[in-house]
Each structure stands twice: as C-alpha cells, then as structure tokens.
Amino acid sequence: MDKKKVLVADPISEKGIDELRAVPELDVVVRIGIKPEELLECAHEFEGIVVRSQTKITAAVFEKAVKLKAVGRAGVGVDNIDVPAANKHGVIVMNTPAGNTISTAEHSFTLLMSLARSIPQAHASVIAGKWERKHFEGVELNGKTLAVLGMGRIGGEVARRAMAFGMRVVCYDPYLAPARATALRVELMTTVEDAIRDADFITVHMPMTAETKYLLNKERLALCKRGVRIVNCARGGLVEEAALVEALRSGHVGGAALDVYETEPPAADHALFSFPNVVLTPHLGASTYEAQENVGIEIARAIKDALVDGIVSNAVNMPSVDRKTLDAIGPYLRFAETLGRLAGQLAPKQPEVLRVNYSGQVGEGDTTLISRAILKGYLEVGSSEGAVNWVNAPGVADRLGLRVTESRLATPADFTELIEVTAGTGERRASVAGTFFGKSPRIVGINGRRIEAAPEGTLLIYENRDQPGIVGTVGNILGQHNVNIASMSLSRDARDGVALTVLNLDHGAGPEVLAELTRHPAILNARELRI
C-alpha cells in the first residue's frame, strides 16, 4: 500500500503527532523548524502539511507541492498560508477554531480584569518596593456594559463570563441570528457604532479580512464614551494602533489590553509601551497546555479525515462535511458529479451560465456541497485548466466566466425530489435531470424530454424523426460493430414528430459508428456520453 506522506513542520502536541502516526495509511515526517528553501526542495513529496504560525506555505510552495491535498493549521488564523494559491492548486486549508476557544476566552477576560483593576501595574509596583494603594484604584465590572464585536465561539464564551460578573453584554455580529442572540442573553446591535457607543469595555473577536481591518479606527474610537477600555486577543490590525495611541494620549480611551499586534513582535520603541494604563502580552491567547494539546489532536484528525476518509472539517476554502453528513448526502454527491459530467458533454461551447434547480426533499437542506459536486463534474469535462477538484472548481468557473446559480421549487410535479442542471447561453442550452428511485439514481430528463436511464457506463443519445424502423436500424448498426445494448429509454414528442432515445451500452461505440448512424436520413444527431 502506497502511504500518503504528511509533513509536520511546526511544533504540535505529541498526542497530535501520535494520532497521525497511528494511521496505517499515513507516513508522518516531523521536521520542526524546516527552512523555507528546504521546504521548497521537498514539498513535492507530501500530500499533507501541518503548521502552526512559524512555517509559511506560500504560492511558491504550492507550485512545488504537486501531490498536496491538505494543509492543516494548528490554530485559528491562516495568515501564514496563501489561501488564494491553495484554491488555485485545489488544496484544502483547514484550521482548528474550537481547540483554543476556552484558552483565548479566558485570556481575554483576564486582560479585561487586569484593565479594570490595574493588576500588572500593581504587581510591578509592589515588587519594586512601593505600596501605592490609592494610585491603583480600579472599577467594578458589575453593572458595566461590555461590547463584544464578533459572537463566534470565543466571543460567546467571553460573553458568558461577563454575564457571570454582572455585566450587561451588547454585541455586533453580521452573521448572528436574532434568535441566537436571545438564547445567548445578549443584546444584538445592527452596527458596530451602535454596539460601542455606550460601552465601558470593548473586546474584539473577529477574523482579519478586508472588511474587518481597522474595525476600531479613529472615527469609531471617537464615538466611544470617554474612558472606554479596549481588549484585543483576536488579530492584530482589528484595532488601528496609531488611532489607539492618539486616543490613549488624549485620555479618551481609558486603557487598552492587547495580546496581538499589527506587527509581531512590536518594535522596541512602540508608542504603546509608554502608557501606564496599557497591558501587553506576547500573543498568549492559545498558550495553555490544554489548548495546544487540543489543537494538535484536532488538526491531526482533520488531516487524517481529509486524506484517508474524504471528510473535510473546519476548512476555510470549501464547505466542510462531517461523517454523518457525508453518509447522508454521499449518494447525492456521486450522482451530482455524474449529472455535471453529462451536462458538460451536452452543453454548447462557451456557456455563460450553469444553473442548478432543486425540487422537493433534496432542496430542503444545505445544497452547497451538491452544487459543488455538479460544478466539479461539469468542469472536468470542459475545462482546459488541468485537474479540477472540490476546492478549485469555483475559481476555475470564475476564470472561465461561468456563472453558477441555484434555484428551488418546493413541490416537483412528478418526483419526490429532482435535480436539474442546465448550461448554456441564451437560447443555446442543454439540460439533464435526475432523481432517485428508492436508492437507485436515474436520469429522468434530457433537454426537457422525459426519459429513464441508469447513470452508468456509456450512453448513446440520438434524436430521429418519429417513424417506423429506426430502433431496428440502430440496433442493426450497433450489432454489426459488436456493440451490445444494455438498456433503452425512448421519449416521443408528438408536437415536433421527433423522438429521443437513450441507450446504455456495454462499451463505447466510437466515432465511426456515430458517423454511420447520422448518415441515416431520419437520424438527426447522435452522440456518446461517458459517465
């Protein structure tokens, strides 16, 4: 058995490494602190790479890593991984958002309490031989308002701890449903400005994106009440440091506690070092024994699942799918790829739109993965950009100018559920539809005509004028070329007098047979589709 090689390039817990080594299908290579030039030299050997924050997986690495299928980051941020390059090369990028949740939430709350009571400053004063009780008068958390910007796992845990201290919690999160906010017992605001306006403390828990960079900038800090205290244990750059320094200097911001910075480590002469009401730690949010063990085990299992079982969890560049979901929708995914491949072979050249319509039960859940499978199958037929997979399919479609859309009909007319794929431009289009009869997938429509065919082997599709003798003629031609018919489905349309026939063949007929068929005056066209 050829084993899949996995490189562990940064320190993760021994239990995580043991998890990987226990998988018979994997060959684990541990090279902690590998240099960039060394990584480029050996990248072609590996199908999986595990990193933390030290090793950078650049576009150049992805170019060299021709076998690479998955990169796992033992942590939350993926700043050291070139995700667009991963998309281009079809590599799954996964992180571990849950493993350090409690650790980071606890550190955030520790910094919040340190700001309220000047704990680090008081400690430094005592060990310096001073006794300055009046100098370190603090504030209580009870009754104060905390604004949580980002109510994901960590933000939610911080909110729970704040409420235990009697704080009022308001939050801003564009993806948090009002019902979920009610369940968490927090007040959901519609804008950042509304959330921070009356806050005594602000804590940020969002990823770094183009939209969230400088989430707390000069203008928003000016909106805050005088004396507000700010905590950032998420990502450097969510708080504009230059604006924060200015607000601290003016006294508008009453204190700040940072664990992350725009540049790490910050320069030795950074202006933040000069303020007595600032608490700084060296990116310690996930630095607990439990968190490091958790993220090591979590990323090891994610790499194993992706490379061995085809299960994707915590991916940042494609939909994730757990084992239960995969078991439930696995048949749909396989059939969806088939429908995509058929549509790719039927569609006219240079289509602009690929439309997927779901009817009935199949459209009631999350269809993201099913649509991705259809797109993958479709592009595998018509794309000239090399290998297409689950990760790079949307990027390939975008580069080709292919727009992918979804629609839904609640109640299909003739089937409990139906998936219809249409591709084309304007009036030039082709379609294929499929459903399940029990557990068996069936193609039930081609170009709007009702047929029934098993999605297996080779399909011979031809249209002819609806007149006697055509079925016998086709059978005779195929027989002369030793091509056996496994099954047949016939669709007649009295409106135009044209019949469509789908034959399942034991093996391909070939271009010579197709040419002979279309020489018959009643056969309008014939084509062979590979499943």
Image (cartoon, rainbow, N blue to C red):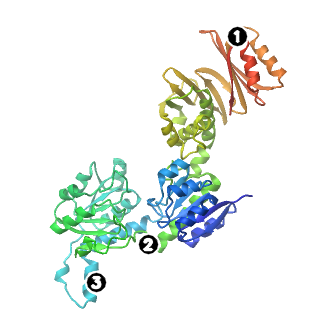
Q: Are marks 2 and 3 in contact (CB under 8 Å)?
A: no
Judged by depth in the image, the label closer to the viewer, 2 or 1, is 1
Q: Nearer the viewer, residue 29 or 335?
A: 29
Name the amino acid type tagged 3.
Answer: His
Q: Which residue is identified by label 2?
A: 287
Q: Which residue is identified by label 3?
A: 123
Q: Nearer the viewer, residue 22 or 413?
A: 22
Left or right of residue 166, residue 337 in this image = right
The Cα–Cα distance between marks 3 and 1, rounded to whole angstroms, is: 95 Å
Res 488 label: none
> Quick check: 368 above or below 415?
below
N-terminal of the two: label 2 or label 1? 2
N-terminal of the two: label 3 or label 1? 3
Res. 316 in view: no
Mark 2 packing: few (<14 Cα in 10 Å), some, or many (20+)? some
Element type at marker 3? helix
Mark 1 packing: few (<14 Cα in 10 Å), some, or many (20+)? some
The Cα–Cα distance between marks 2 and 3, rounded to whole angstroms, is: 22 Å
* Residue pictured at 48% horizontal, 72% vertical: 290
